[in-house]
Amino acid sequence: MKFPAMKKRIKSAWPQINLTGERQVVACFLDAVRANPEDAWAFVSKVYSPGLDLNELRELLSSGAQKMVSKAMYLSDPKNCLTRSVYVEDPGRNLRRLLHLRMIREPDHNGLWKIFGVEQEECGRI
């Protein structure tokens, strides 16, 4: 005996949360720093952020072109931490820097990852 197949749509009682990955968090953070540093604090860790100067970062990003380099996994990164690197180049000011954005896993409505530090590394000039 064959039973008829019933299609039933079950609605979830849980709200749908779109948690973005680390690449999207970095891109949104850099866009927010360029537009308004006050909005960028939503992507920064609440625990580890007292020494972060977003106005200085805004000046660096203001006229330069950015390129996401790679997801760098360092041996010194503790568990639930990772580093994303961004190459910033401004030929007008003869500026070439590599920004290392240190991230920690702190899920909330803005994403899974929060930025807790930004380190700058100057690249060679041509």
Image (tube, helix red, strand yellow):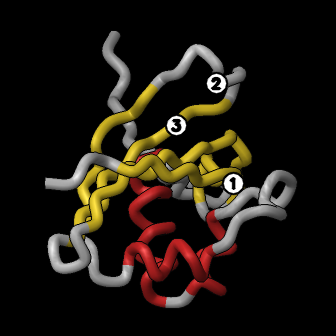
Query: 72 or 95: which is nearer to us?
Result: 95
Horizontally, residue 103 falls left or right of residue 48, namely left
Callout 2: SS: loop
Q: How far across and how far down the image is residue 106, in percent?
A: 73, 47
Q: Do the residues bearing badges 3 and 2 touch, measured as CB atoms within 8 Å?
A: yes
Q: Do the residues bearing badges 1 and 3 touch, measured as CB atoms within 8 Å?
A: no
- What is the distance, in whole Å, between disc 1 and disc 2 at their CAs? 34 Å
- What is the distance, in whole Å, between disc 1 and disc 3 at their CAs? 32 Å
Q: How far across and how far down the image is residue 84, in percent?
A: 45, 42
Which residue lies at the image location 49% right of the left edge and 79% below the top edge? 58
Query: 93 or 70: which is nearer to us?
Result: 93
Residue tagged 2? 77
The quarter of the image holding the N terminus is top left
Callout 1: SS: loop
Residue 93, quarter of the rendered image: bottom left
Q: Which of pointers 1 and 3 indicates the residue nearer the eye?
A: 3
Q: Which mark is residue 106?
A: none
Q: Is residue 117 above or below residue 4?
A: below
Residue neighbourhood size for the residue with mark 2, other residues' Cα within 10 Å, grouped as few (<14), some (14–19), many (≥20): some
Count of marks overlaid on the render: 3
Question: Is tag 1's residue or tag 2's residue first in the polypeptide sequence?
Answer: 1
The quarter of the image holding the C terminus is bottom left
Identify the amino acid type marked 3.
Thr
Q: Which mark is residue 83?
A: 3
Identify the amino acid type marked 1.
Trp
Q: Which mark is residue 14?
A: 1
Identify the amino acid type marked 2.
Asp
- What is the distance, in whole Å, between disc 3 and disc 2 at their CAs? 8 Å
Q: How far across and how far down the image is residue 36, in percent?
A: 54, 89
Q: Is residue 35 above or below residue 108?
A: below
